[in-house]
Image (cartoon, grey):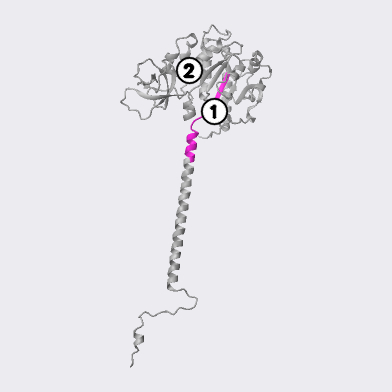
Amino acid sequence: PVVNMATMEQPREKRRKEQPGEMSRSDRKKLKEARKQDVKRLKELEFLKKLEKQRAVEEKAQKDLEGKEEQKGRLYTVSVALPGSVLDNAQSPELRTYLAGQIARACTVFSVDEIVVFDEQGEDVKSVNGEFRGIGKKGQASVQLARILQYLECPQYLRKSFFPKHQDLQFAGLLNPLDSPHHMRVNEVSEYREGVVVKRPSKPNKGSFVDCGMRKGVQIDRNLQAGLRVTVQMQKNENSESKVLKGTVVAPHAPRTESGLYWGYTMRLASCLSAVFTECPFSDGYDLSIGTSERGSNVDSVTLPPFKHLLVVFGGLQGLEASVDIDQSLTVTDPSTLFHHYLNTCPGQGSRTIRTEEALLITLSILRPKIDTAVGRSTSP
């Protein structure tokens, strides 16, 4: 048989004859490669979306953390004003002292930042200089109340430096301690401490030494006059073997505004009811004031607006009406016109009278959740 040489020369692989409209091998290869690229691109997009979602979650968590850190401090203040004549309702010096201790305890428990003692008798009393000359003596009740309140607010290890023996403080040792956060124990570790500048020589360009109630002295960042009471921010990571500790003097309100700590109350004497407002230590004054009286509106129906500085005023034995009548600076006769809210904080009372120390506890108790709501603070634990 005759062998066709042309057939022998053809490749072993039999070529397919391409049909019209069918893709060539190179086109199919390109399409396959394009599909792979699309799948890869989709996976990359999904991965990027996951990254963005994770980043958004992290940013939100960071913002929440920063928000919590910003809200750590407490910027608003609560002040309480009451007449010194409340002590005249006590029958002995021991009971007068104990009554002042009840007021101090109530204000500390509810984190009151300022106590104002005003004189219902119209005398110009602005300092605690003077002595108690007997029960019912005109003008002396405010002085004695203010002195006892100052004594109790001061940490125990500083009292000898600021309070010499005085007849008003004769029975103060019998009172219950306030035990507030700035009353530190010797070994207690805290970011802040109260202290007194002591007479101790220091090297040039070095700060004064402060007694902060610890076994070691504290050297501050500046030179101050001996005998001053200061608030010290303690230096962290202090060497335990060093002979002295280091600290920085800060404003007395720094523990409250920066760390949210309750750091005791300040004391102020006012000569009359109007002076409570006119001599306000805050530049903007009290932007929310509340008067308390059995003739006021029901406290249950009141919602407090947001505020920076709240003032709650209590009357004496004869109520706020007597304080308004004796104040020569006031032209009004209705005390409710002096306040943003004039409230009855114990509606339906079972006793004809409520003592001021009782009204203090009742009012601060019922106002606490309303204050928390007004300043946007959660009441849940």
Q: Residue at x 47, y 49 (%)?
A: 52
Expressed as whole percent of the image width and height from the top left, the position of residue 348 reads 65, 25
Q: Distance between the residues labelled 1 and 2?
A: 23 Å
In the displayed structure image, the side of residue 295 where residue 3 appears, left or right: left
* Outermost residue, left side: 241
Residue under pointer 1: 76
* Residue 12 vs residue 333, the one in the foreground: 12
Expressed as whole percent of the image width and height from the top left, the position of residue 357 reads 56, 19
Q: Residues within 10 Å of mark 1 (few under 14, many from 20)?
A: some
- Examine the structure image and report whether residue 72 is included in the region drawn in magenta: yes
Q: In which quarter of the image is residue 205?
A: top left
Secondary structure at badge 1 equals loop
Residue under pointer 2: 152
**Residue extent of the magenta highlight:** 63-81
Amino acid type, residue under disc 1 in the picture: Tyr
* Residue 186 vs residue 209, the one in the foreground: 209
- Examine the structure image and report whether residue 313 is included in the region drawn in magenta: no
Query: Is residue 114 shown to the viewer in this render?
Result: yes
Q: Nearer the viewer, mark 1 or mark 2?
A: 1
Secondary structure at badge 2 equals helix
* Outermost residue, bottom side: 1
In the displayed structure image, the side of residue 37 where residue 92 appears, left or right: right
Q: Quadrant of residue 308?
A: top right
Amino acid type, residue under disc 2 in the picture: Leu
* Outermost residue, top side: 133
Q: In this view, does 105 lie above or below 70?
A: above
Of the 4 image quadrants, the one containing the N terminus is: bottom left
